[in-house]
Amino acid sequence: MSEAAEARPTVASYCATFLKPEMLHIYRQITALERVRPIVIAQKREFENQFPFSPVYVVGKPPTHFLRRFWHRQLRDEPWQISKTELESLLSILRKTNAQLLHIYFGHIGVHLLPLIRAWKKPTVVSFHGADVLVDLHKLAYRRATIEMLGLVKRVLVRSDSLGKAIVDLGCDPAKIDIVRAGIPLDEFAFRERNFPTDGDWRFLQAGRLIEKKGYPTTLRVFAKFAARFPRSTITIAGEGPMLEELQTRARELDIADRVSFAGFVSQKALRELYYASHIFIHPSQTGADGNQEGVPNSMLEAMATGLPAFATKHGGIPEAIEDRVSGVLVNERDHDALASALIDIVQDRQLLAGMARAGSDSVRQKFDQRTQVRTLEDVYLRAMRA
């Protein structure tokens, strides 16, 4: 290691799993750090070839983990927390690496790590990403533990203004909150003008985990209405998840199965090619039954950066990236009629569609440049360490 690298303060990033495919934004963030030296601590490591990084310190679950989790979650209806053995292992790593700050990814993981936050005397920050804001917080024990965690950490990072408001509503001191948006490596997603079809051969795309908050049933209903008007149109859904069979059934029921391609998980390179091969990006996010919501979807930002017009919903942080009818289209959650009507109307105005594509790309470049967001994160780290 060079002397310059040694001189940088060490930041330990805790990710329970390093790293799931849908967590590419975390990998981008950690590996782009320059003014601090990142290390990673995890319970387990996955997809190492896809996400190469060193050093990663793995502190596995103790043999009693599942019994303890069952005891706390099922019998006592309270969040489980790390054991004394896990606590000592984590403290040992932090001391050995001379970590000056601990960054815990995801708010509910911060609750599990409360014993570590209490015991470690150097600053801790926790970041919320969307799904981890409201889930289980209708339960008193979970809410109390979350409020305690928010009181103990030095800074609270959120990906959007909307997530920040949700954290304040939980009782967090607004002065503790910093907005660090999902950063997009813009050099990988260059803007490209689209040649929109004149023969009705429209190509739609949605990309993301096949889970409730992504709004895929709305997508299929919208596309069915659009395809009734433009029967040559097709849609690709790129992603894996528990809703696959349900969505395949829904496509058959809507009589669009022959025009819907479920591509499964695709590599970043293949996804980028799909962006450039498509005409419309659709992402009608919605709040899940358990309170699960989006920050700002990374796939939507990538698509917009390439010049793909985005049609989405007034959900989470999406309105912070899209101004309706300027840099994209926004409708209310689950309103498939309004979204289908907007699509059918706007695709017939090529000038408006091209203008939204350019404005959407400009919006991403102004607000979500990875270099800018990583510098903001480093500023947060350095201020917390100085304080």
Image: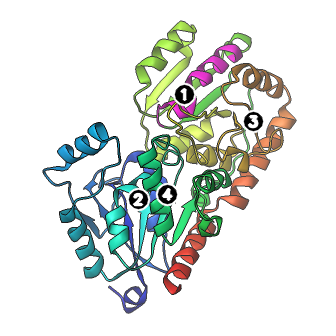
- Quarter of the picture containing the N terminus is bottom left
The mark that comes first in sequence, 2 or 4, is 2
Can the viewer see residue 321? no
> Looking at this view, is 118 or 29 the one in front?
118
Q: Position of residue 63 (x, y in %)?
A: 13, 51
- State yes or no: discs 3 and 1 in contact (Cβ < 8 Å): no
Q: Is residue 357 magenta?
A: no
SS of the residue under disc 3:
strand
Mark 3 crowdedness (10 Å alpha carbons): few <14, some 14-19, many ≥20: many
The mark that comes first in sequence, 2 or 1, is 2
- Which numbered mark, 2 or 4, is in the foreground of this view? 4
- Which residue is identified by label 1? 236
| Residue range (magenta) | 209-226
- Which numbered mark, 4 or 3, is in the foreground of this view? 4
The mark that comes first in sequence, 3 or 1, is 1
SS of the residue under disc 2:
helix
- Which residue is identified by label 4? 147
Q: Position of residue 209 (x, y in %)?
A: 47, 36
Q: Amino acid at mark 4?
A: Ile
> Looking at this view, is 126 or 67 the one in front?
67
The mark that comes first in sequence, 4 or 1, is 4
Q: Amino acid at mark 3?
A: Leu
Q: Amino acid at mark 2?
A: Gly
Q: CA distance from mark 2 to mark 1?
A: 36 Å
Please tell me the numbered disc located at residue 110: 2
Question: From the viewer's perspective, is residue 333 above or below residue 116?
Answer: above
Q: Position of residue 330 (x, y in %)?
A: 75, 36
Q: CA distance from mark 2 to mark 3?
A: 33 Å
> Looking at this view, is 274 or 124 the one in front?
124
The mark that comes first in sequence, 2 or 3, is 2
- Which residue is identified by label 3? 330
Q: Residue at 41% across / 48% down in the picture?
A: 141
